Image (spheres, rainbow, N blue to C red):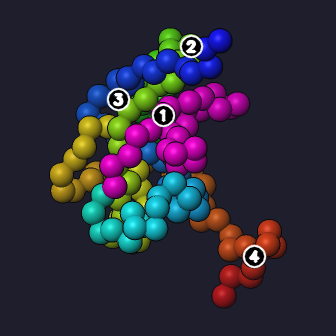
Amino acid sequence: MKLRRGRVPADVGGGFVAGEAVALQTAFAGALTPAERRSPDPVRVDLSLETEGGGRVVVVCRNHVVGFVPPSHEQSLLAQVAAAGRARLETSGQMYREAEGWWRLWVGPPRAGHFPAPEPGADTLGEPTRRIFGLALPDD
């Protein structure tokens, strides 16, 4: 009995910045080790691309959803996920900090130096509310 799924490399072209990073900061923290979170350098990671219930393509790193594929790449990657069938669609990427302090995700071949800004419309969700034991804290 074979339980492992096959792996298929994703064609992400030159790469892109995944969307919804601001809303997914907790997922970034969960996917990175403490040493990686402290590092000023981009962190190289292995990623998989999957579809979710609404038909959007999500980017998964170390079992955490850390981003969404932006609209400009979504149709191509939806087709690749469908063509992969039960196999896992994989690519590489880098997690890096923006000047504002937010973690962001580059999906594609490694970059040296500057990362481009996310495309317009890629970030639609707001910053998550602060919570303790599931209870929302007021914003001060």
Q: Nearer the viewer, mark 3 or mark 2?
A: 2
Return the residue at label 2: 85
Residue ID for mark 4: 132
Residue 50 inside the magenta-drawn segment:
yes
- Of residues 40 and 125, the one nearer the viewer is 40
Residues at discs 3 and 2 in contact (Cβ within 8 Å): no
Residue 119 seen in this snapshot: no
Rounded to the nearest angstrom, the CA distance separating label 1 from label 2 is: 13 Å
**Quarter occupied by residue 57:** top right
The residue located at (58%, 44%) in the rendering is 63
For label 1, the crowd category at 10 Å Cα-Cα, with few meaning under 14, some 14 to 19 and many 20 or more, is: many
At label 4, counting other C-alpha atoms closer than 10 Å, the crowd grade (few under 14, some 14-19, many 20 or more) is few
For disc 1, the marked residue is 48
Residue type of the residue flagged with mark 4: Ile
Identify the element where label 2 is drawn.
loop
- Distance from disc 4 to disc 3, alpha carbons, whole Å, reads 38 Å
Whether residue 95 sits left or right of residue 50 in the image: it is left
Q: Residue 2, image x and y in percent?
A: 61, 14
